[in-house]
Image (cartoon, rainbow, N blue to C red):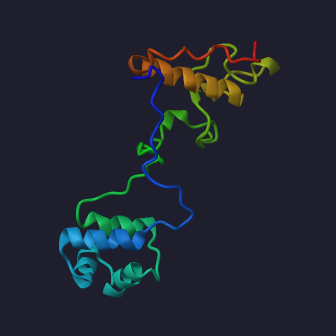
């Protein structure tokens, strides 16, 4: 047995092909044991719509696909190539900026920043009630360290990620 961490195993082959909506709808019909007309009636769509989707002549919108798969109690989930579920980000009302807009999704919002945590502290600007780290290397290093600390029981054999990030001190 090796002491090195196991490499993630791909559960799907990378593909440039479009997603298999036709196969998903056929699988829903099989699970529900419904004809195209019956599935269409339960989903509230025209029966020809189900036929076009199954024939590959129509790619359903996400809203339509959710209605169709909802007939059998299924729901859409996004998973990465290793089978890990990607959870949607929630909107927090208290993390909107002064113009009532969300901060960019790729940034980690810092509520009630300490001195030096706001990117404009160096310019002497007033600190807002929330901010984010603009420096990608700092953000990535903080995420790695946070992930390591949250999963310390699993990562006990791995070295602690460096802090502060190299090149920033």
For residue 36, which quarter of the picture? bottom left
**Residue shown at 44% from the left, 65% from the top:** 62
Which residue occupies the foreground of this view, 130 or 169?
169
Q: Is residue 33 visible?
A: yes
User: Viewed as shown, does residue 58 lie left or right of 39?
Assistant: right
Q: Residue furthest left?
A: 33
169, above or below 19, in the image: above
Question: Considering depth in this image, is 97 or 67 the residue closer to the camera?
Answer: 67
Relative image position of residue 14 (x, y in whole percent): 53, 56
Residue 22, percent across and down? Answer: 39, 74
Q: Is residue 71 left or right of residue 150?
A: left
Residue 19 location, x and y as percent?
47, 66
Residue 33, by quadrant, is bottom left
Q: Residue most toward the right?
A: 123
Q: Is residue 56 left or right of residue 107?
A: left
- Which residue is pictured at 42% across the width and 49% down the height? 11
Residue at 36% over, 64% down: 66
For the N terminus, the quadrant is top left
Tell me what residue is drawn at x 72 percent, y 17 percent: 166
Residue 111 visible? The answer is no
Q: Position of residue 69 (x, y in %)?
A: 30, 65
Tell which of 116 and 86 is nearer to you: 86
Q: How many marks?
A: 0
Q: Residue furthest front?
A: 1
Quadrant location of the C terminus in the rendered image: top right
Q: Quadrant of residue 53?
A: bottom left
Q: Is residue 49 above or below residue 9?
A: below
């Amino acid at each position: 047995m090796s002491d090195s961490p196991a490499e993630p195993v791909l559960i799907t082959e990378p593909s440039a092909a479009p997603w298999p909506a036709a196969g998903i709808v056929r699988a829903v019909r099989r699970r529900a044991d419904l004809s195209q007309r019956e599935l269409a009636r339960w989903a509230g769509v025209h029966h020809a719509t189900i036929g076009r989707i199954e024939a590959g002549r129509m790619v359903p919108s996400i809203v339509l696909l959710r209605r169709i798969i909802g007939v059998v109690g299924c729901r859409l989930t996004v998973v990465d190539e290793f089978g890990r579920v990607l959870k949607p980000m929630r909107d927090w009302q208290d993390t909107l900026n002064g113009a009532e807009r969300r901060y960019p999704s790729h940034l980690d919002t810092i509520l009630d920043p300490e001195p030096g945590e706001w990117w404009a502290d160096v310019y002497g600007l007033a600190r807002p009630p929330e901010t984010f780290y603009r420096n990608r290397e700092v953000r990535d290093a903080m995420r790695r360290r946070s992930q390591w600390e949250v999963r310390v029981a699993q990562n006990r054999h791995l070295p602690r990620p460096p802090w502060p990030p190299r090149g920033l001190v």
